Image (spheres, rainbow, N blue to C red):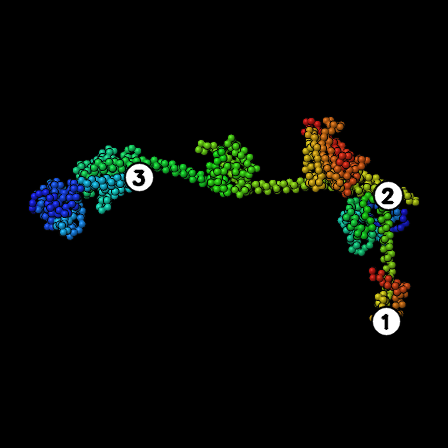
Amino acid sequence: MSTQTGWVLVVDDDPGMREALESLFKSVGLSVITCGCAAELHALRLPEGPRCLVLDVRLPGKSGLDMQEELLRRKDGTPIIFITGHGDIPMSVRAMKAGAVEFLPKPFRDQDLLDAVQLALQRDRARLEREQATQALRRLFDTLTPREKEVMAHVVEGKLNKQIAAAVGVSEITVKVHRGNVMRKMKAASLADLVRIAERLRDL
Amino acid sequence: MAHSSERPASEGPGLPQLGRTVPDRIDTVPAVAIAAPNNAVITRDLHGRITSWNADAERIFGYPAGAMIGVSGFRLFPAGRRKEEEAILARILAGAPAETIETTQQTSDGRSLQVSAQLAPIRDRNGQVIGISIIARDITEIRSREREIARLSRLYAALSEINQAIVKTASRPQLFERICRLLVDQGGFVAAWIGWHDPAAHRLVPSAYYGLPGGSQERITRYLEQVAIYTDDRAEARGPTGTAFRTDRPLICNDLLAEPSTAPWRAAILASGWRASAALPIRVAGTAQGVLTVYAQEVGFFRDKEEILLREAASDISFALDHFAIETHRLVAEQAVQNERNFSAALIDSLPGVFYAYEESGKFLRWNRNFEQVSGFSGEEISVMHPADFFDPSERKAVLDRITDVFQLGFATVEANFRAKDGTLTPYYFTGTRADIAGRRCLVGVGIDITARKQSEQARQAAEDASRAAQAELARMARISLLGEFAASVAHEINQPLAAIATNGAAATRWLAAVPPHGDKARDCITRIEWEAHRASDIIQRMRGFVTRAAPADTRLDLNQMVGEIVEFVEHDLRNDTVTLHTDLAPDLPAIRGDRIQLQQVLLNLVINAIEAMRPVTDRPRVMRIATAQDPSCPVPPGGVRVLIEDSGTGFDAAAAEQLFGRFFTTKLGGTGLGLAIARSIIEHHGGRIWAEPAPALRGAIFQFSLPAATEGSA
């Protein structure tokens, strides 16, 4: 039994299935939230931490596939595992291409589902860590003065201090001072490190 | 003859003197005299004195030569022609050649003679004219005979004209008009009229009349205005015309004024100037109906020849009138026939179709214009053709059979293509009725173009076929999808509790395996498993309910017939998948009882399964065999009925034979695995059984089911 923790969000219109899934996930130490439909899920305040969605394809109202599309539009990277009572090949292809972790026909082997959930949570944990690191860099970046942000932008473009001084309209020595502040405040070990940090900030 | 107081100067025969006077020329005169005996030969000198008067002159004229020789006042012509005589004599004395004249002379006893005389000069030796010779001949008799001949000729000409008029004239009034005119113009009578009997008035009413132009035309008109002739016994009925009518005999009156019976009309007769009349009855059908009366100005004009002629004319007129009556009757009859003929001709020609009448031999007697137009053959061609010539060889026998039927049974019809000269075929409906025409057995009938009807029939047939095909296809789709849909929805429903059971089971295992084990959690799971199992069972019950709920029908069914229907349903699929079907249906298959639709679904499911199982097969023929047979092995009396469906498909393992009918077993891609399960439910519900086995011959599968036969007498 895995020691990894995380939230499993189950959306299935069959209450018996919801209860069974809840018990199964809890038996392996996972936290579970179950919903009967997409609207119900939206109404919830979702907990922090790694999480994944277990969606029945056929749902009242929005189908599981519709929900997947919506998450993609919102840039919500929550991993999705589909379970279905009547899935067909085209449907599963569509789901997998759109980034689903797994597509399981009912009835499925419990281990298959649990493996899929662990994989999903692992991905989500990585996603969260990446997001947290970026958030930390963002906080560091926010400590820079406007002039330092300006100098940093020129630095990561690979410009020389002389060029930066001309562009910004300060002395070369002043550029050196700002540059030193940027490296320190952004906790960058080298110019290459700073360029990487800048790229991650741009992705945000 | 001119009478002269002068006596002849000398007595003696004229001939010697003549000979003496002109001895050298005498040969000419005597030659005439000798050649023409009974000729008076007279000579005279330059002074007009008679120098010779022969014996014939004595005999003809009645004067002796002695009395005449030397007389100088002899005249050839009567007083009115003296100038003419002088001129002739002067010409001859001047040396002109001989001239012949015709004149009248009176004899010594006062008779008037017609004389023909030749006058010639007499010359002396020197050629000097010394006198004139006259050779005269009495031609009174000849002229009289000639006149008689002319009169008769005229009468006969008139009669001939009358006969021609009779031939040419179509109506009685016209004929009467012409007869009156001819009798006057040609016959020599001055006036003529025809009175026709009016029985009511007892009167002869003028029907036609005519008078000679130059007086008599007006006279006859006035005369007939004044004269009324009756046919009873009053005085005005006793004149010649009335008498001729009453006695039915011709009556000639040669002196009207002397005849006492004409007293009532004396004034009119006097005014007319007519003195003789002839009245001739005109008969119709043997009795007098009218009178033809003609008039002449001379007393005694009518003689036997005229009478004969007029009798004949009257008789011809009567004949004509009888003929008219007959002719009129004939014309009326002919007109009626013609009318009838025109009517039937118009009728025949106005018929919308073709009309024909032909003998048993096939010789055409009659046909309408349409027949020629439609066939493209001329009347001349049709007249030598046979009815069979108007049909395609492939249809001839059928048509000839129907023609035979007409002559044997009296009436028949046939639909066939009428073949025109150019080979085009037009669908026609022909009738034929036996009829006797001119003593011969004939076929009379009409043909109607049924192209439009055929087309609409075909269009309707096509529409019906299309709609039937569409319906069949729809029904087929509905039936095929019914089981599949049903199976799919059942599968989905059952999947839910199954998945829940599996998941709960897994969860329970994990709760128990935990350290320390969570017995309560595991128990919850097991409770849910139990609950889900019941839920699954409920679903299956519902499915059973669906099957049984739809089976209240319990009717007598013929499985052979049902197999036929199913084969019809899947014909399209069989063709598409190039499956050869063999059916082997037991002829005396007992009926069964059950629900038609459910059993059809079983059959359909097995057949579709077979077709689908053969789809991957490409290395051998796709063959399906459907057989029905009695099944004595059935434990329920009176035995059972078995249906076998064998295919050359992919088959199955013998070991899996029982599994096949379990739920969710499928060897098909996309199959639900429920079709056979439901089929088994249905068959078992009907008290039968269903089983499968490999088909060694076709290397496919054999599915069979058997059902108990219906007991005898059950409805």
Q: Quadrant of residue B30?
A: top left
Please name the residue shown 31% across and 37% down the image.
B320
Q: Quadrant of residue B167?
A: top left
Q: Label 1 is placed on what type of residue?
A: Lys
Q: Position of residue B127 (x, y in %)?
A: 15, 51
Q: Is B368 left, or right, of A2 in this rendering?
A: left
Identified by mark 3, the residue type is Ile
Give the number of the disc on residue B166: 3
Q: Chain of mark 3?
A: B
In front: B401, or A104?
Answer: B401
Residue B666 showing in the rendered view: yes
Of circles 2 and 1, the one toward us is: 1
Instruction: Tell me how far mark 2 sits from mark 1, CA to CA.
Output: 69 Å
> Please, what secondary structure does the residue beneath circle 2 have?
helix
Q: Which residue is mark 2?
A: B506
Q: Which residue carries the number 1 mark?
A: A162
- Point out the image quarter for the C terminus of chain B: top right
Question: Tags 2 and 1 in contact by the CB under 8 Å rule?
Answer: no
Residue mark closest to the camera, 3 vs 1: 3
From this view, report whether residue B179 is shown above or below residue B95.
above
Q: Are marks 3 and 1 on the same chain?
A: no
Amino acid type of the residue that numbered disc 2 sits on in the rendered structure: Ala
Q: Is residue B200 something that shows in the picture?
A: no
Q: Nearer the viewer, residue B298 or B16?
A: B16
Q: Marks 3 and 1, Cα distance to the nearest angstrom? A: 155 Å
Q: Residues within 10 Å of mark 3 (few under 14, many from 20)?
A: many
Secondary element type, mark 3: helix
Q: Position of residue B9 (x, y in %)?
A: 7, 46
Quadrant into which the N terminus of chain B falls: top left
Seen in the picture, residue A144 relative to B319 is either above or below; the reply is: below
User: Disc 2 or disc 3, which is closer to the eye?
Assistant: 3
In the image, A201: left or right of B276? right
